[in-house]
Amino acid sequence: MNDFFQENKKVAKVIHEVADLANYLWQKGWAERNAGNISVNLSDIIEDVDLDLDNYPKFELAQPYPALGNKFFFVTGTGKRMRDLAQNPMKNACIIKLNKKADSYHIISMKKRNLYNFRPTSELPTHLLVHNQLVESGSTKRAVVHTHPNELVAMTQIPKFQNAETLNKTLWGMHPEAFVFVPRGVFMVPYILPGSHKIADATVVGFEQGHEVVIWEKHGAFAIGDTVSDAFDMIDILSKSARIWFMAKQSGFEPEGLNEEQLLELKDAFLK
Ligand code: 2HA
Ligand code: ZN
């Protein structure tokens, strides 16, 4: 099965993109140990594969994801390191296929005997719920990326930035491109236990409202995009703004930011 996916050029390209991204996340210092997770909906590029699902291990899901019946996903593995994934994606991530009712999945990229204790990411509830929303809403976005971007996480340790309005205004004000590329700003989720269905439910609200980046207070960021690179760019741009804020602050000054008039001018020019 491994070979099949590598022979499918479109799937191989997605796997390469994920491996490249895993390397960037590690290089950026956003992926300590097993931090972060990535998923890509492959259903448009894996059409009909004649699979005997009984040959592949089956796992129940705690809830159904109605829009995801029979869909395929490339998903990083729980406990796996991004730096290892960059070297060997098929050992540190897997392809899953949901069943028709979308209340269980099979891992189809590994034979039962090779599976050992491999499982998809601990944040699977959020990844699947977000993909469910993307498919339901007819979005072209197929990639979901979660990482721990240092400066953005650090900002959420500062009480005034636990409010999306203040955080967005500050991030946009540090660099105009932050507004150009993330004009809807981030959606803030207050601290909730990682890996929980509760954090999945809170996160999907942000994407339903049209945001492309959701910040998890004191934890990290979730972003969506047509590709994993697009999702990464959103976090990278905001992270740059956060870095500029800290640099100005550390030099002993209160960062000035763009004023209301300048922000309005950007809104007129770029908010479609
Ligand atoms: O994959 O980042 O949020 C480990 C995490 C959990
Ligand atoms: Zn995390």
Image (tube, rainbow, N blue to C red):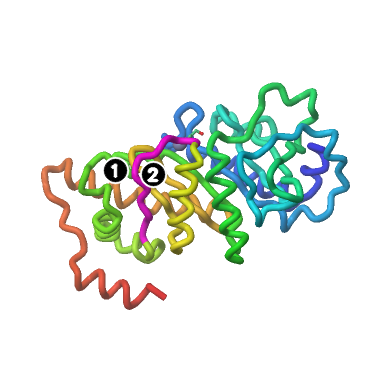
In the image, residue 258 lies in the stretch drawn in magenta: no
Left-right relation of 6 to 173:
right
- The 10 Å Cα crowd at callout 2, few under 14, some 14 to 19, many 20 or more, is many
- Does label 2 point to a residue whose CB lies under 8 Å from ligand 2? yes
Left-right relation of 19 to 28:
right
**Range shown magenta:** 185-195
Question: Mark 1: which amino acid?
Answer: Thr
Q: CA distance from mark 2 to mark 1?
A: 8 Å
To which quarter of the image does residue 258 belong? bottom left
Q: Main secondary structure of the magenta part?
A: loop
| Nearer the observer, 109 or 249 | 109
Q: Which mark is residue 156?
A: 1
User: Who's the residue at 61% across and 62% down the image?
Assistant: 136
Q: Are marks 2 and 1 in contact (CB under 8 Å)?
A: yes
Q: Position of residue 117 (x, y in %)?
A: 67, 23
Q: Quadrant location of the N terminus?
A: top right
| Nearer the observer, 189 or 139 | 189
Residue annotated with mark 2: 216
Left-right relation of 263 to 220:
left
